[in-house]
Amino acid sequence: LFYQRPPLRDRARAMAAALVGQPAPDFAIALQDGSTKSLSEFIGDGPVVLDFYANFCPACVDAAHEMERLPPPGGGGGA
């Protein structure tokens, strides 16, 4: 008798569901101008949307262009 693990997709969904509502861990990224930004710098500014994509992925690039059309926090025009 062998134990068969659930498919990776199901395990990933279960892990993601367990994190819903939990605060994200702080991290910092390097920006193109050489400065850094950390997630904690945005606390209290409203929702933060992180979109990780690859520029060689057509669907990812399309999604990034859609993100650019979102209004900035507080309303107003496009980003």
Image (cartoon, rainbow, N blue to C red):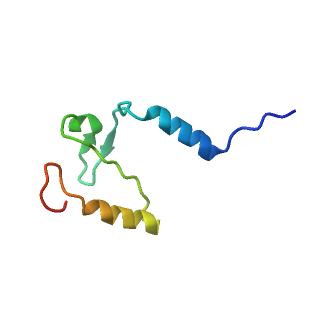
> In the image, is 17 to the left or to the right of 43?
right
| Residue in the foreground of this view, choosing between 28 and 7 | 7
Q: Is residue 23 visible?
A: yes
Where does the C terminus fall, quadrant-wise? bottom left
**Whole-percent x, y for residue 21 in the image:** 38, 32
> In the image, is 73 to the left or to the right of 49?
left
**Whole-percent x, y for residue 13 in the image:** 54, 42
Residue 63 quadrant? bottom left
Residue 45 quadrant? top left
> In the image, is 55 to the left or to the right of 74?
right
Where does the N terminus fall, quadrant-wise? top right
Q: Look at 28% across and 38% down and name the residue there.
A: 38
Residue 8 quadrant? top right
The residue most toward the right is 1
**Whole-percent x, y for residue 31 in the image:** 28, 50
Q: Look at 27% across and 54% down and name the residue there.
A: 32
Q: Is residue 78 above or below residue 5?
A: below
**Whole-percent x, y for residue 55 in the image:** 41, 64
Q: Is residue 56 visible?
A: no
**Callout count:** 0
Q: Look at 18% across and 62% down and name the residue there.
A: 78
